[in-house]
Image (cartoon, rainbow, N blue to C red):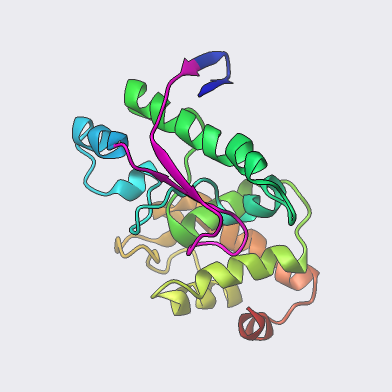
């Protein structure tokens, strides 16, 4: 692998496994780093939860937030595009983390919180399909009812959905902005949240 980001060139090699379908996505293939580098990085930086290195509980790599899947890997894309657009950047980030103890780009939280953080920062005009993607992600969460309440009637002082017992807007401020933006988009597009939840 030879890749460069913001002037930082990294040449590295990983042992990986790529399969054509992923249990975590309807769109993109699966990437697994199977050479033990992820575990070694976790030990070096005393990381208890491998999700902090964007590895799912089943060992697959979380190569991008859900909203980027369609843009990075449109329907009909080749496996080569997956390698170039998603696998190589992920492995670059892992190698960078090994050297510097941090990701080379803005990091997002796990699960729905990360989806909402991205939603807040993405300047693209949102469509019904974009909102359906978020709702589909929320439905996978065990505490989806708390997200649903926030989408219907945002309240910054309710306890954060992550379980920290802190107010949502203080604990995960970027995700809170995503809630506000999604709420506004629901009204702008005159979409019914309950109907969308049943559709996804």
48 left or right, relative to 35: left
Which one is nearer the viewer's eye here, 122 or 7? Answer: 7
97 magenta-colored: no
Residue 52 versus residue 187 in the image, above or below? above
Q: Main secondary structure of the magenta part?
A: loop
| Residue displayed at 43% across by 21% down | 12
Q: Say whether residue 183 is visible.
A: no
Please state the total of marks drawn on the protein image.
0
Judge whether 128 appears above or below 40 on screen: below
Segment colored magenta:
10-35
Placement of the C terminus among the 4 image quadrants:
bottom right
Q: Residue at x 62, y 59 (%)?
A: 27
Please indicate, yes or no, whether residue 181 appears anywhere in the rendered image. yes
Among the 4 quarters of the image, the one containing residue 39: top left
In the depicted view, which residue is nearer to us: 71 or 162? 71
Residue 40 location in percent, x, y?
23, 33
Location of residue 47 in the rendering, given as x and y in whole percent from the top left corner: 24, 41
Q: Is residue 127 left or right of residue 84?
A: right
Closer-to-camera residue (116/73): 73
User: In the image, residue 28 lies at what x, y percent?
Assistant: 59, 55
Vertical arrangement, residue 198 with respect to residue 170, above or below? below
Q: Residue at x 58, y 56 (%)?
A: 66
- Compared across the picture, whether 71 is left or right of 29 comes to right
């Amino acid at each position: 692998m030879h890749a460069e980001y913001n002037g930082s060139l990294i040449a590295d090699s990983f042992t990986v496994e790529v399969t054509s379908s992923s249990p975590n996505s309807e769109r993109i293939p699966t990437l697994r780093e199977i050479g033990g580098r992820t575990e070694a990085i976790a030990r070096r930086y005393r990381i208890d939860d491998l999700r902090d290195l964007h590895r799912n509980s089943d060992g697959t790599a979380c190569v991008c937030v859900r909203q980027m899947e369609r843009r990075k890997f449109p329907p009909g894309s080749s496996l080569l595009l997956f390698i170039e657009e998603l696998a190589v950047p992920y492995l670059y980030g892992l190698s960078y983390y090994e050297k510097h103890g941090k990701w080379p780009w803005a990091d997002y939280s796990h699960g729905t919180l990360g989806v909402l953080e991205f939603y807040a920062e993405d300047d693209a005009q949102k469509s019904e399909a974009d909102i359906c993607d978020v709702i589909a992600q929320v439905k996978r969460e065990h505490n989806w009812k708390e997200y649903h309440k926030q989408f219907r009637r945002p309240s910054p002082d309710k306890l954060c959905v992550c379980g920290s017992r802190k107010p949502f807007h203080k604990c995960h401020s970027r995700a809170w902005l995503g809630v506000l933006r999604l709420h506004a988009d629901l009204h702008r597009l005159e979409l019914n949240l309950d109907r969308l939840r049943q559709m996804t």
